[in-house]
Image (cartoon, rainbow, N blue to C red):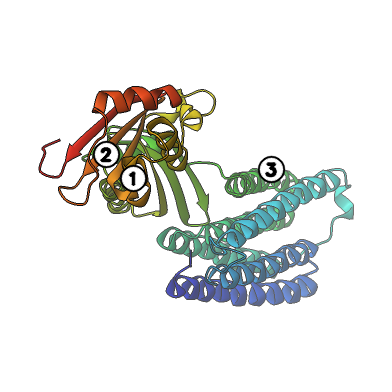
Amino acid sequence: MTVPPSRAQAVRRITLFSLATNFTLSLAQIAVGIFAHAFSLIADASHTLADIVADFVVLFAAGRAARPADPDHPYGHGRIETAASLFLGVLLVVVGLGFLWAAGERLQMPADQLPTLHPGALFMALCTLLAKEALFRFGMRAGKRLDAPVLIANAWHARSDAASSLVVAIGIGGSLLGVPFLEPLAAALVGFLILIMGLKIGWRALGELIDTGLPPGELARIEATVRAVPGVLDMHELRTRRMSSHVLCDLHVRVAPRLSVTEGHAIADTVWASIHRAHPHIDEVLVHIDTENDLDQHPPTAHHALPARDEFLAATRRAWGENDALAHWLAAHPEQLQLHYCEGALEALVLLPAADTPALALAPAELFSRLRAHIPALRHLSFYRENDTP
């Protein structure tokens, strides 16, 4: 599985823009914070620097995820984006806990120990708030358009920065108005919200890493698509998993037990095409063809006790005699022998061309009776001539 280059380039461009914006805001906050004696701005700048680290992580993940599949990674490198989302989720949790801890400490500080702030600090906090909110909206739209969970995670990180800038603005404004306790109180609230965001993002990424399937409603729609395919009698063991923006799916499809291999394969191809057409977000589909519901067979399938082709041919030589021409002819012409494994029993069909076929030394009923003495699971043995109608 390979991430399209155009998508990887778009993720890279958006992340570079976010990186440049965060770096500029961080420098501006530090400069204004030092000038205005606003230590909250300097702290918020440190929070912004965490965004820069996160952006580097996204750039690394997007570049690695765009690499094509290789022998060591046959499904591609999409899980790198998932791991990056998990990292960002953990980072949000840490930042949220940090806000809660800092808010608790500030609430215990005497009012006269808080610094006197310059009004320019409030202007800088408001500008930062607007810039961060704009980054959030831009990143969310891009993430949904490109179906890039890592961009959505990074957008929520920008929203957490906007929330922290709101805390700074409220704190600075409250300090300028003579109500200094508003800053730590708001910080505690925003810290809790950031913590919840990080847990949600991290939980989703963790769900992908442990191969959590699609929601039940989507599974029901996939099942309806499969059941509508002509030739499909039933289906079971539908399994899905996510890998970044990709979805992998495998399922078992039951068809009539006496279909040819080629017809069963054609039905599987039709199922594959129908799923891709009706559910374009599903990238890979693996269809296993069953002739009966293998979930009902115990344990694990009754077919394991039935003889394979070579065992069947060896039984014909023992039952019909080592010198029996028919047994040797079947061994030399495997395409003329069809074996059907149905409901825990074996059915055999022998196709006899009009020419170059040994005559039946015994009646079909006698051949069946002798062979069944060696293969008790043999339920039917049928012979058809080339110009017979089965």
Residue 368 vs 135, above or below: the answer is above
Mark 1 Cα shell of 10 Å, populated few (<14), some (14-19), many (≥20): many
* Residue linked to disc 2: 350
Q: Earlier in the sequence, mark 2 or mark 1?
A: 1
Mark 3 highlights which residue?
192
Q: Nearer the viewer, residue 164 or 300?
A: 300
Kind of residue sitting beneath label 1: Leu
Q: Could you give the CA–CA distance between mark 1 and mark 3, rounded to whole angstroms?
A: 76 Å
Q: Residues within 10 Å of mark 2 (few under 14, many from 20)?
A: some
User: If the image is split into quadrants, where does the C terminus sit?
Assistant: top left
Q: Position of residue 1 (x, y in %)?
A: 48, 63
Find out whether the residues at labels 1 and 3 contact each other: C-beta distance under 8 Å: no
Q: Give the mark nearest the N terminus, 3 or 2.
A: 3
Q: Nearer the viewer, mark 2 or mark 1?
A: 1
Q: CA distance from mark 3 to mark 2?
A: 74 Å
Q: Which of 69 and 104 lies nearest the eye of the viewer?
A: 69
Q: Residues within 10 Å of mark 3 (few under 14, many from 20)?
A: some
Per the model, the C-alpha gap separating discs 2 and 1 is 8 Å
The residue sitting at 66% across, 75% down in the picture is 23
- 284 vs 205, left or right, is left
**Residue on which disc 1 sits:** 330
